[in-house]
Image (tube, helix red, strand yellow):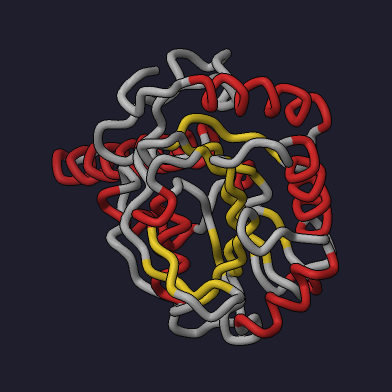
Amino acid sequence: MSLASRTRRRLVLSVGGGALVLGAAILAALVVGPRFSTGARAPASAGTTLEKLDLYGSVPEFSLIERSGRRVGRNDLQGKVWVANFIYTKCTETCPTQSLQIAQLQRSFGDVPDMRFVSITVDPQHDTWEVLASYARRYGADPERWLFLTGDKRGIYCLAKGFNLGVVDPSDPNPPACDSAALRPFGAVLAWLGPPAAFATHGSQGLIMHSARLVLIDRAGRIRAYHPATNEASLERLTPNLRRLLAERDTGSR
């Protein structure tokens, strides 16, 4: 084999090896789960569950429209312990399950004045505040304690990423662009690949992929735990977590 041939062969192997390493890294990042924003803690080990109360980031600023027609933002929930989730009214897979679970939580915490539940639609084009009002009545949602939010699609999808959750609308040729680099180690590459499977689920007719997890937020607006709405064992651990957060009277305590 000539010197030129050997050089070309080493170059091909080197490039191929680099591509394999990058591919493996991207795959590993997708499998691990959510990407945590600056200042957040990822689980200490592979055996640590996201249901463990910890600090997984802070809820970003947002301004959306509640089903009552009023504007609601992060500051309106300051000092409250709340549970957030992402749904849409045409979804027939996990969304009804999520809403039923929150309806149960609303009953369980009916005597707690500083408890809130916040459901955010990922289909704002269809889910106007009037549509959400009708959906909320179906589940007996208390208008003061269980909020349903809609608004600008980009704002909602970027808010979901701020929660470290994935949302993808495959039918949208121009998906909302967010600052993916701040949330994901591989930035635009992973954004193109879509949300990790563990944090996304198909909605009705496969229209929208979105998270089926309930997110626990403390009085200071910090994300403290994630619970899959479709996992009964996880939901049994959710209520004790909420009670511990409610017992943290000081917003700076953990």
> From the viewer's perspective, is residue 75 above or below residue 132?
above
Q: Nearer the viewer, residue 147 or 25?
A: 147
In front of the other: 31 or 146: 146
Q: Residue at x 35, y 28 (%)?
A: 251
Q: Where residue 5 sits: x, y (%)?
A: 22, 44
Examine the rendered structure and indicate whether residue 213 appears above or below residue 130: above
Image quadrant in which the N terminus is located: top left
Front residue of 234 and 169: 234
Residue 122: give x, y in percent of width and height. 58, 69
Residue 79 is at least partly visible in this image: yes
Residue beneath the point at 35% across and 19% down = 253
| Left or right placement of residue 56 versus residue 215 in this view | left
User: Residue 242: image x %, image y %?
Assistant: 61, 28
Number of numbered discs overlaid on the protein picture: 0
Quadrant the C terminus occupies: top left
Query: Residue at the spot x=31%, y=42% of the render?
Result: 185
| Residue 109 relative to residue 47: left or right | right
Q: Decide if residue 16 is in sight here.
A: no
Q: Is residue 94 left or right of residue 192?
A: right
Is residue 209 shown above or below 231?
Answer: below
Residue 249 sits in which quadrant? top left
Q: Is residue 113 left or right of residue 212?
A: left
Residue at left offset 82%, top offset 61% = 140
